Amino acid sequence: MAKVVCVLYDDPVDGYPKSYARDDLPTIAGYPGGQTLPTPKAVDFQPGTLLGSVSGELGLRKYLESLGHTLVVTSDKDGPDSVLERELHDAEIVISQPFWPAYLTAERIAKAPKLKLALTAGIGSDHVDLQAAIERGVTVAEVTYCNSISVSEHVVMMILGLVRNYIPSYQWVVKGGWNIADCVTRSYDVEGMHVGTVAAGRIGLAVLRRLKPFDMHLHYTDRHRLPAEVEQELGLTWHATREEMYKVCDVVTLNCPLHPETEHMINEDTLKLFKRGAYLVNTARGKLCDRDAIARALENGQLAGYAGDVWFPQPAPKDHPWRTMPHHGMTPHISGTSLSAQARYAAGTREILECYFEGRPIRDEYLIVQGGALAGTGAHSYSKGNATGGSEEAAKFKKAG
Ligand code: NDP
């Protein structure tokens, strides 16, 4: 029988909810492009409830225990004394969400000799040392598409929030003010602006589609070019390099995976290519950007605003400069874990577990690493190597209390 260790974020500070703001979720027929929604044989949860926190258990306990497996659920994931470290020695499966990532470094994988499956309940498996997983023959899988649309909505919200100066204006209301001039001296329309996405995969393309009705000029750069009819339909300008795209954009959004090729791609040098006063929105991964270079660019006006929900490490230490830098619109990592998204990725997690335990193949689109090599989506979108370096810093959040 297998031991499954599931690392989830903490319950709300006032306890696991007894009621919700809405009674149900809208019905979604499928994903754009035709990929089907998760297809588990059954689920043991009510869609629309909080599944991603410790008490929600991704709705997995009944299913796993009915098969005789052991489920350990914890939020205690960082540092050598964490529950995760203590449970690794006989864990066969580790489930983790990118919002509260269980960093599976090479050292941790070495401490887990029985580990066979690292399952991401979400999208983005950069918290796993993929090189170590490849070498050890550990399968890495994620629930492709489960929250791509959720994130694209967040990106659009953040672009509008930054350009229109929403957060500082909201704060004037809360402070009891009516300071219109203070609000509008940094407020613009997005109409007519040039917006570019680094990567036009599921999220990047969905962002472009959502921005089209705002009459913005749409740009993208990607390793593979979109079909000509899509470029035509949306009026897209493709750029062969990121650098070429940065130069012409008022707003840049990052929507590519983190892997050794993309780590710190936004840095002191590449920021110099941006138009002065550009806005940068990053909901992909914190480590795509050099932390201190972003803070400096906001301080010296090279960037007019920065927003996103991804940090490195996560949780971000209390003294992380992105908490206090000027003109930012950061949230904790939430864009892909709306209640709507949770229902999909909990179902997808269940689907992957059913495949694993029943000896059926995991869908190709869910695979990142299998059989000692990048596989499926991983072979298409990732490169070999490790992007977990520095993740031990996450323990600083716990120490600070
Ligand atoms: P997709 O796999 O659909 O898209 C990723 C795209 O990135 C692909 O088009 C890929 O290109 C492209 N890409 C990879 N490397 C590069 C590179 N070096 N330069 C330019 N483009 C590159 O994934 P999603 O759109 O669903 O998700 C993208 C990322 O967003 C995830 O990897 C994850 O990190 C993040 N994410 C964040 C969430 C959140 O909650 N904030 C939730 C979900 C995802 P090609 O296919 O041409 O190789």
Image (cartoon, rainbow, N blue to C red):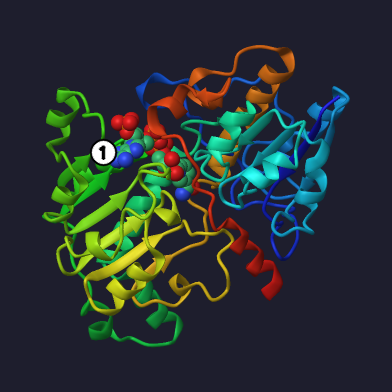
**Where's the N terminus, which quadrant?**
top right
Q: Is mark 1 within 8 Å of ligand 1?
A: no
Closer-to-camera residue (91/211): 91
Type of the residue with mark 1: Arg
Residue on which the image places disc 1:
209
Q: Tell me where residue 256 sits by quadrant.
A: top left
- Where ligand 1 lies, by image quadrant? top left
Q: Residue at x 76, y 49 (%)?
A: 84
In the picture shown, does residue 255 fall above or below 143?
A: below
User: In the image, 135: left or right of 160?
Assistant: right
**Is any part of residue 80 visible from this angle?**
yes
Q: Residue at x 43, y 43 (%)?
A: 259
> Picture coordinates of residue 22 (x, y %)?
59, 48
User: In the image, 376: left or right of 276?
Assistant: right
Closer-to-camera residue (273/54): 273
Q: Tell me where residue 77 sits by quadrant.
A: bottom right
**Where's the C terminus, which quadrant?**
bottom right
Q: Residue at x 20, y 44 (%)?
A: 213
Q: Residue at x 62, y 49 (%)?
A: 103
Closer-to-camera residue (373/160): 373
